[in-house]
Amino acid sequence: MRKRIAAALLCMCLLVPALTAPALAAFPDVPADEWYTEYVDLCAEKGIVNGFEDGTFRPTGYLRRSEFIKMLAASAPLSYKSELPGRHWAEQYWAMLSENGVLEGLDIPCTFDALQKKTTRYEMAVMIRNFLAKVRGETEAVTNGAARRIPDWAYIPEAYRGAVAQVYAKGVINGMKNTAGAEDGSFCGERKLTRAQASAVMVRLLDPARRSPVDLSDSNPYRLADAPNGMQPFMIWARENGYLINSNEPRGILNKLLFGDENKTYFESVEEAAPFMRDVTVNVWQLQPDGTKTQGTLKVTVHKYLAADVYEIFQRIFEDEEKFPIASAGGLRCSDKLRHAWGAAIDINPDWNCAADRENGAVKITVGKGWWPLGADKSEWAGSLTEPSPYSIAGGGSVVKAFAAYGWGWGGTWQSSRDFMHFSVRTDGG
């Protein structure tokens, strides 16, 4: 028999069944000035969430699948036809979501053990995406530029990328902030969904005016329609498909893509490399004599299959709040057999990010003046620099992070020698 529960009744949703509801804003463990306070209060006001028997809300506690499923089911007049097995208190809400396509793409059977598991942020994203499209009838956003906007995109499993991109683009999720082990804006989908996060998601889900949509459409002018990596960063694609030996040295199929010959490993001249190269114009911050920073552009020559990634890497640097200034950047150079001779390495601000070796135990600067980033103590690598330089690349700064997001490494991590200006498609920056 078709069963239907009125929306008004559904809004009497509890995070845990049979718990008493505290008065609005009466949660003693929800401070007045936390980022989630407003969301918790709104959800409590609407009856979407309630507290525990002791009157607490426990905002940092993790949400079970059954609890989040009930929160979603409580927000819309959904029905179900299934005969319920009587195994779990939330199975009717599972049936509502399942029969309306909200659980599509997830392996969450209607069993006690499955419903008792904690909800991951990946699972939340899939349910929200389905709910927006199948229940609320919202048109999906264009998200083919998500790789540049979501810091940990490269580590998101393919099965979840579409959902994660949608919740970002719709403004339901803004990404993690001030979170240990995660760059601000990262999704961190393998982590469990907290009660505070769920409250924020529900408010934004139901009230589009409270969302902060993000444009994730791709406007990259260097994207190749026939690129073998599609929208995925080229080096991450190559590693995931086993086209590199020990994660760094290309094998036959990649040599053919990079050099036109499975047996070739570098370009001997700029002329030979030219058909495989592309000049990329990137946005940069330029430091003026009065200390202000103004927008400018630089041109760097790199391999055509890396051009789109390089454009996005520099755009990440440009958009970061650090506003790291770039005076110069160099790409293709055929003076050796290494990554510059592939069109797969970039040097940035060489005067202030030296290349250096150790000779008889002492540092010997071979290129540039030295290396001394702002906010860092003077080190043996400072060379002739007499003070910290805004042009020196910090190990934990926006430049290193931007290249790493696309599978590139930094020469500043080397041991006996250092090349602080140097970034390459090798994970070690070699």
Image (spheres, grey):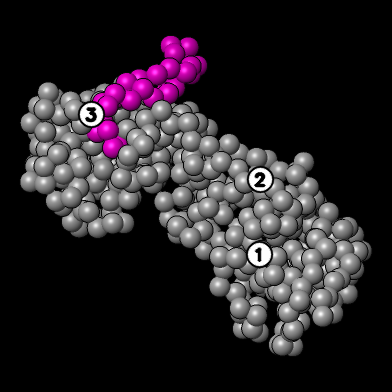
Disc assigned to residue 101? 1
Q: Quadrant of residue 196?
A: bottom right
Is disc 2 placed on a helix, strand or loop? loop
Under mark 3, the amino acid is Met
> Which residue is at the far top?
289
Q: CA distance from mark 3 to mark 2?
A: 39 Å
Is any part of residue 381 visible from this angle? no
Residue bearing the label numbered 2: 139
Relative to 130, is 97 above or below?
below
N-terminal label among 1 and 2: 1
Residue at figure coordinates x 87%, y 63% from the top left: 7
Residue 386 lies, in percent from the top left, at: 32, 24
Determine the residue positioned at 32% across, 33% down: 307
Q: Earlier in the sequence, mark 3 or mark 2?
A: 2
**Quick one: SS at disc 3?**
strand
Q: Residues within 10 Å of mark 3 (few under 14, many from 20)?
A: many
Q: Indicate which label's residue lies in the foreground, 3 or 1.
A: 1
Marks 1/2: CA distance? 15 Å
Given residues 64 and 366, the one toward you in this image is: 64
Above or below 227: residue 328: above
User: For residue 182: magenta?
Assistant: no
What amino acid is labelled 2 in the image? Thr
Q: Residue at x 85, y 60 (%)?
A: 44
- Please state, as top left, top right, bottom left or bottom right, where the N terminus lies in the image: bottom right
Residue 193: image location, x then y, percent: 63, 63
For mark 3, what is the residue? 277
As measured in the structure, the alpha-carbon distance from the residue carrying label 3 to the one carrying label 1 is: 46 Å
For residue 54, side relative to residue 104 (left or right): right
Labels 3 & 2 near each other (Cβ < 8 A): no
The region drawn magenta spans 277-306
